[in-house]
Amino acid sequence: MPPDNPVSRQGTAAAPAPTSTLFALVAIVAVIAAQSFAILTSPAEGDMGHLQKIMYVHVPAAWMAFISFFVVLVYSIRYLWRRNENDDLLAASAAEVGAVFTGLTLMLGMIWGRPAWGVWWVWDARLTSTLVLFLIFVGYLALRAFVDDSGQRARWSAAVGAIGAINVPIVYMSVKWWRTLHQPPSSPETLDPAYTMGLRLNAIALLLVTIYFIRKRYEIARVERAVEHLAEAAAMRGK
Amino acid sequence: MAWQHDWRRVRAIARKDLTTELRAKAGFNGVASLAVTILILLGLALGPDAAALRNAAVGAVWLATLFSGVLAFNRSFQVELESGALEPLLLYPGARWTIFAGKLIANFAFVSLMVAIVTVAGIVLFGIAVPARWPSLIAVIALGVIGLVVLGTFYASMASRSRAREVLLPLLLFPMLVPVLLAATTASKALLGADIMHEAGPWIRLLIGFDIVFLIATFIAFEHVIEA
Amino acid sequence: MIEMNQTFIIAAYSVTWAVILGYLLLVSRKGSRVRDQYERMLGEIRVEDRP
């Protein structure tokens, strides 16, 4: 146990190196550039006109959600293995960012679906799996909110995060089977080479944003944890 | 032999849980009654057209089972919680997994009995004809119940000790049970009909795979989760 | 048809930027709030530790 000494506590909170605002600016500029490139260079398609341009935000958002979830999986397992508090905090940060991107993916999916299919929602494989993934994220975050003991919270979140992550491919597979058995397949996203470059650029740019979000959130989580430590120490001194 | 000792612990815990539930008859009777009540409400909400009810039957039975099941799972840890018996139980020498195994067995017995009652009620209320392939149907139901019990018991070991257990358990459990729900309902519907497309087979394999994967995963995770 | 699609395209990009900038804002505000809280608690402890 580290000594009950304000200076050492401060040391814990000061590292990691603060995520620079410059990085955020670079990421934002990258997204603007990638979106501009994609919007301006992609040709109109069939009778959907320019609707497929939504793909440049919808698909990368989905990818970021899955990447975040993968980070949650890795750091959850790492925490259970090494019991380093920081691994738990990073997993939790990735979960929050992942929830944001999953929510965004769902909203964009609906915004795309309305003109494309005429309805706000269809129970197609991708949309439904993303919704279930969103609920799994929400469950993880709710668990953290309702557990006060930091050790228990970390262990339980790690277990829930890892087990939840294992289920993601199973959920996707089962929903896909469920759909293909009863309904004709939803319009596939045939990736014309004309679109791939724009998609890749947008994915990379959004990845920069995601990295910034997770690092920033992690930084804050470290300070939050330090505050918790201070409160625990104060309580132990019988304030 | 250590293995025999562990197995004895498992049986002891399972027996303890089951006798506790049987003595507090309110426990099982209450949960089973709730399940049937939910089924009746679903019938009222989705009916009265006989064809609509027959279509909804499989889904209704599973939903009634799911919603009542969460009560059973939280209860399985409640006794230890209220009497503060969890800490001493953990102090006893012996593997922790035996606690999980014991509770799994007790919960499986409990939920199986409940499912049997709900299924019979569903057959009657929703006008189902028992199909020729009813043994396969029972297999599907059993596999679904295993998945439900494994994940339900696991999440309840945490939710029951948290601040908002009534909300947290369903919130954590239900999204995870999506594959089980889809597999069990689709396979059941196929088996209630003629299953000309042989749909049930792949879904049964999915259920088996799901059950194995999560049986292993929860046993491993339980060690980390049960520490006080 | 294409005009109607344009509404949705604009909506999609607006929502995306709203989420990105919104989360950015939320996270910065939370960051300063938590850091202030930490400084404050640290200050309280230092005051106590003074003999």
Image (spheres, coloured by chain):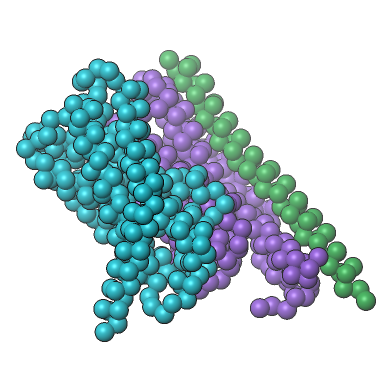
Q: Is residue A232 left or right of residue A197?
A: right
Residue A222 appears in which quarter of the rendering?
bottom right
User: Which one is in front, B28 or A23?
Assistant: B28
Identify the residue at horizontal 30%, vertical 25% (top origin): B43
The color chain A is rendered in: purple
Identify the residue at horizontal 25%, vertical 41% (top origin): B117
Query: Any idea which chain is the cyan one in this picture?
Result: B
Q: Is residue B51 left or right of residue A237?
A: left
User: Which one is in front, A105 or B202?
Assistant: B202
Image location (x, y in percent) of residue A190: 31, 36
Q: Is residue A185 above or below residue B208?
A: above
Image location (x, y in percent) of residue B193: 12, 32
Q: Residue furthest bottom?
A: B1
Q: Quadrant of the N terminus of chain B?
A: bottom left
Query: Any idea which chain is the green one in this picture?
Result: C
User: Which one is in front, A15 or B193?
Assistant: B193
Image location (x, y in percent) of residue A91: 53, 59
Res B147 seen here: no
Residue B121 appears in which quarter of the rendering?
top left
Q: Is residue A34 left or right of residue A185?
A: right
Q: Is residue A216 above or below residue A61?
A: below
Q: Is residue A104 left or right of residue A195?
A: right
User: Which one is in front, A204 or A165?
Assistant: A165
Image location (x, y in percent) of residue B89: 45, 71
Identify the residue at horizontal 44%, vertical 29% (top origin): A110
Q: Is residue B53 above or below residue B74?
A: above
Res B160 seen here: yes
